[in-house]
Amino acid sequence: LYKDENQRLPGCGGDSYTYVRRILSSERVIMTGPQQKLWCKAIVKAVEDSASNETVRCFVKSQYTTDCDTRRLSIFDASNSDTSSSSETVVEMMIESDGLGTHNELDDTLNSPIN
């Protein structure tokens, strides 16, 4: 691949991190390719802003949906509850960097509250 055989691709060869997010909605949601790219772009920007001199790569590793029933209970009247059908989409993303020892930094960045 390389003439000197001692270079590596930016964003590869370092730490990798699996990032899982769940989306609960009234109907099934499957992220399209462009939506996956937008989500990854936002994650890469957030991670690169917090990790100095790191190149970061991101891709959606898997996604699936499950149907579930949700039940809303009234705090005033237990007999007054509402059961409705909903769907949960689980998105598993793989985030890779070319640095080592960045796992905690990735975890802190991706799981911190949005300001």
Image (spheres, rainbow, N blue to C red):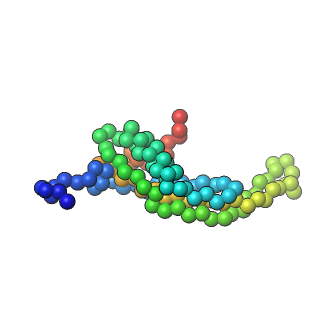
Q: Is residue 52 left or right of residue 35?
A: left
- Farthest-out residue, left: 4
Left or right: 80, with 50 as reference point: right
* Horizontal side of residue 10 vs 94, given as left or right: left
- The foreground one among 29 and 104 is 29
Give how far across and how far down residue 93 sits, in percent: 46, 56
Q: Quadrant of the N terminus?
A: bottom left
Answer left or right for 18 relative to 87: left
x, y (%) of residue 103? 37, 50
Number of callouts: 0
Q: Nearer the viewer, residue 76 or 57?
A: 57
Q: Is residue 26 visible?
A: yes
Residue at 66% from the left image edge and 54% from the top image edge? 25
Residue drawn at (49%, 62%), measured in percent from left and top? 62
Please tell me which residue is depicted at 53% across the width and 34% down the height of the picture. Answer: 115
In front of the other: 5 or 108? 5
Query: Residue at (53%, 40%) from the top-left corner?
Result: 113
Extreme top residue here? 115
Horizontal and vertical percent for residue 46?
A: 43, 41
Q: Is residue 110 visible?
A: no
Residue 56 pos. (x, y %): 35, 48
Q: Height in image: 43 above or below 80?
A: above
